[in-house]
């Protein structure tokens, strides 16, 4: 009869495709037991959004069945745990990963990407929060169908409003739609901080998505200085003027020592063209996370508070956004593991 040691030795030959390390050294194999000719174990993925379960099943079968004497079947259970970087001097007890969504200019669909990313991750099983850090021009409440929402206050802390499985907080909940938010720089910094410390987010989230205002102003600087931002996603349209602005946004995060998880090209198609985001990613040496086609369903989703990934999951745009969310989740796990010295620096590129 096979032993646990033999099975673990065989599983140490199974390589996690994105991290390029074996699943045993990554501590992904848990609760191993052997019942007759069946090996029972749990694989703990680094993100609930992992699209690679079938790959793991195939590789584990190849490593064990017919290779370890007595093992004819596998009974694999699944769990997921987003890594937590414990090397930060500044800790966030709100979320395991903080992901900033940024753009060099307005009008490129950054909030559309942020809302659909949050909803897609939640639908894939993650615990997700969404902060609308565009304090002066909040759009997230409308895009999430929460235009008239008002957060409750319990024990002097605001309670985020839930929509599509996502916990949401925005200044749009705190003022009338026709009343402008007029704030100076220090007040903007305070508002962003309050979204983290004066809101009761409940149990630790897997991901906090932060929808930043466009440009390279106070908001990203305040966020990066006060909280351990895991990485930034840069949103651009395909045309060169948008790409030029996105380049400046990416350079800003480099200066703030925040990893750029990758580039998203939004509104791709005949009208705006395509390829600008991919070229920017190539030039910057970062990942191209995908392109979202310009479709009416995306625009309507934002206008009427029905994110396209939830309302039109079979559309080309929704499929692209879900694949993008999986790519962002994978990149986030890689960055967190690299920051914790679990995987070598040269794996992150």
Image (tube, rainbow, N blue to C red):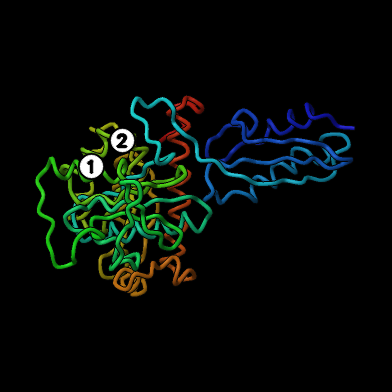
Q: Residues within 10 Å of mark 1 (few under 14, many from 20)?
A: many
Tell me the SS state at disc 2.
Answer: loop
Q: Report the number of discs.
A: 2
Residue 189 located left or right of residue 308: left
| Residue labelled with disc 1 | 220
Residue 255 located left or right of residue 289: left
Spot occupied by residue 109 in the image (x, y as percentages of width and height)? 27, 61
Tell me the SS state at disc 1.
Answer: helix
Spot occupied by residue 80 in the image (x, y as percentages of width and height)? 57, 44
Q: Residue at x 48, y 32 (%)?
A: 337
Q: Check the image and report above or below for 229 versus 244.
A: above
Tell me the distance, in whole angstroms, between the alpha carbons under discs 1 and 2: 10 Å
Spot occupied by residue 311 in the image (x, y as percentages of width and height)? 44, 71
Residue 297 located left or right of residue 25: left
Please state which of residues 316 and 312 is positioned toward the viewer in this rendering. 312
Please state which of residues 237 and 39 is positioned toward the viewer in this rendering. 39
| Residue labelled with disc 2 | 227
Spot occupied by residue 338 in the image (x, y as percentages of width and height)? 45, 30
Residue 14 located left or right of residue 125: right
């Amino acid at each position: 009869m096979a032993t646990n040691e033999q099975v673990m030795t065989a599983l140490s030959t199974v390589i996690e495709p994105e991290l390029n390390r074996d699943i045993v050294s990554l501590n992904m194999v848990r609760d191993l037991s052997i019942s007759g000719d069946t090996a029972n174990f749990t694989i703990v993925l680094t993100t609930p959004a992992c699209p690679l379960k079938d790959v793991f099943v195939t590789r584990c079968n190849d490593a064990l069945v017919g290779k370890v004497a007595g093992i004819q079947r596998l009974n694999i259970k699944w769990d997921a745990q987003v890594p937590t970087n414990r090397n930060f001097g500044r800790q966030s007890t709100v979320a395991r990963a903080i992901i900033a969504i940024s753009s060099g200019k307005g009008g490129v669909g950054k909030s559309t990407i942020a809302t659909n990313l949050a909803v897609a991750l939640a639908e894939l099983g993650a615990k997700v929060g969404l902060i609308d850090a565009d304090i002066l021009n909040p759009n997230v409440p409308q895009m999430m169908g929460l235009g008239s929402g008002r957060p409750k206050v319990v024990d002097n802390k605001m309670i985020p409003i839930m929509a599509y499985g996502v916990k949401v907080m925005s200044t749009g909940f705190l003022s009338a739609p026709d009343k402008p938010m007029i704030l100076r720089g220090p007040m903007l910094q305070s508002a962003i901080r309050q979204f983290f410390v004066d809101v009761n987010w409940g149990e630790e989230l897997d991901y906090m998505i932060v929808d930043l205002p466009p440009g390279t102003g106070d908001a990203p600087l305040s966020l990066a200085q006060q909280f351990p931002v895991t990485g930034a996603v840069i949103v651009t349209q395909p045309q060169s003027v948008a790409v030029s602005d996105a380049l400046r946004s990416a350079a800003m995060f480099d200066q703030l020592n925040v990893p750029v998880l990758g580039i998203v090209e939004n509104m791709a198609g005949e009208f705006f063209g395509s390829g600008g985001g991919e070229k920017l990613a190539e030039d910057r040496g970062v990942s191209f996370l995908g392109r979202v086609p310009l479709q009416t369903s995306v625009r309507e989703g934002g206008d009427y508070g029905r994110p396209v990934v939830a309302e039109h999951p079979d559309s080309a745009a929704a499929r692209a956004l879900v694949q993008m969310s999986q790519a962002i989740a994978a990149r986030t796990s890689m960055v967190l593991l690299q920051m914790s010295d679990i995987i070598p620096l040269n794996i992150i590129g």
